Amino acid sequence: MAAFRWQFAACPSTLSDYSPVSTATLAWTRRRQNQGHRNCNSANIKTFHGLSYSGGSSTCGGRNRSSVRCFSALTPELKTTLDKVVTSDKVVVFMKGTKDFPQCGFSNTVVQILKSLNVPFETINILENELLRLGLKEYSSWPTFPQIYIDGEFFGGCDITVEAYKSGELQEVLEKAMCS
Amino acid sequence: MAVTKEQVESTLNSKLNPSHLDVSDTSGGCGASYCVEIVSEQFEGKRLLERHRMVNTALAEEMKQIHALSITKALTPQQWALQNPPPPNPQSPPAAA
């Protein structure tokens, strides 16, 4: 059975600092990976505006000619995409690094716990995409990573996962999710 | 500018009025990461996730500069008392014969 893998890729802004509107584009690719073939032959690529702001400079003040409005990284399009991502697998972990190469002690702890419980889980590396990283903090109302979603619902970060693992609650929640 | 341990303690004291609070700088004095142990009546009736959110919300401004925050304990006073029972009173010496 083919495995699906989510990948977020950020496209750089194409406009100069003095343009009235600078747009960053967030593109996600859903790739079909056949066994033994990691390069996709067909990809469904969707691009949408992940961020837009007026003023020209990426920070408030500076060389702005027009007023700068504060922006939210969580655009409606990103929210819709994240709604799909968190429900695409029973367990989804937004982390620093990947499950094979975690790049943070807290993220690694969560990965090791889930591996020890022998549950299938998907990981998404938030270090690859700044907009995703910022947007997720708003989406989850959680300021740090890793962020664990079980059955589409935010479960918690590393501390909560460790506590729940020690108490057995994590195992119960996972079992319930797998059976649903 | 790095956040100091005193700032974290002051913010948590004023916003959550804890009966017990222990904040440790786990970044070797750089103010980049902290470990928090907090006991507050405001956690009553709230699940662990909600309690952590309350701490995160209380430290929202500090979180902009802190790299990592670990909440090792977020308990109600009752839960804290169960985990930390008072030491038994030493037995009074036997009366002389």
Image: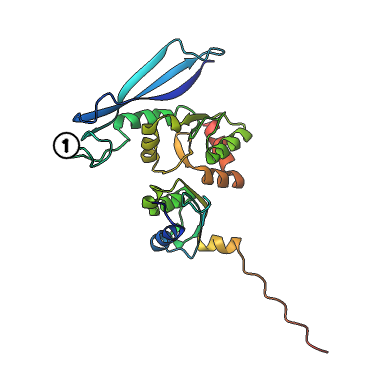
Q: What element carries label 1?
A: loop
Name the residue furthest left: A66
Q: Where is residue A50 in the image (x, y as percent from the top left)?
A: 31, 29
> At 36% across and 51% down in the image, what residue appears?
B61
Residue B57's place in the image compared with B20, above or below, is above
Q: Can residue B74 be seen in this view?
A: no
- At label 1, the amino acid type is Arg
- Residue named by callout 1: A65
Residue A65 falls in image quadrant: top left
Q: Position of residue B12 (x, y in %)?
A: 42, 59
* Quadrant containing the N terminus of chain A in the rendered view: top right
Residue A142 falls in image quadrant: top left
What is the image's colouring? rainbow
Q: Return the residue nearer the eye: A22 or A154.
A: A22
Q: Can residue A58 be seen in this view?
A: yes
Q: Return the residue nearer the eye: A12 or B38.
A: A12
Residue A159's place in the image compared with B4, above or below, is above
Name the residue furthest bottom: B97
Q: Return the residue nearer the eye: A141 or A170.
A: A141
Q: Where is residue B17 in the image (x, y as percent from the top left)?
A: 42, 64
Does residue A100 appear left or right of residue A61 in this picture?
right
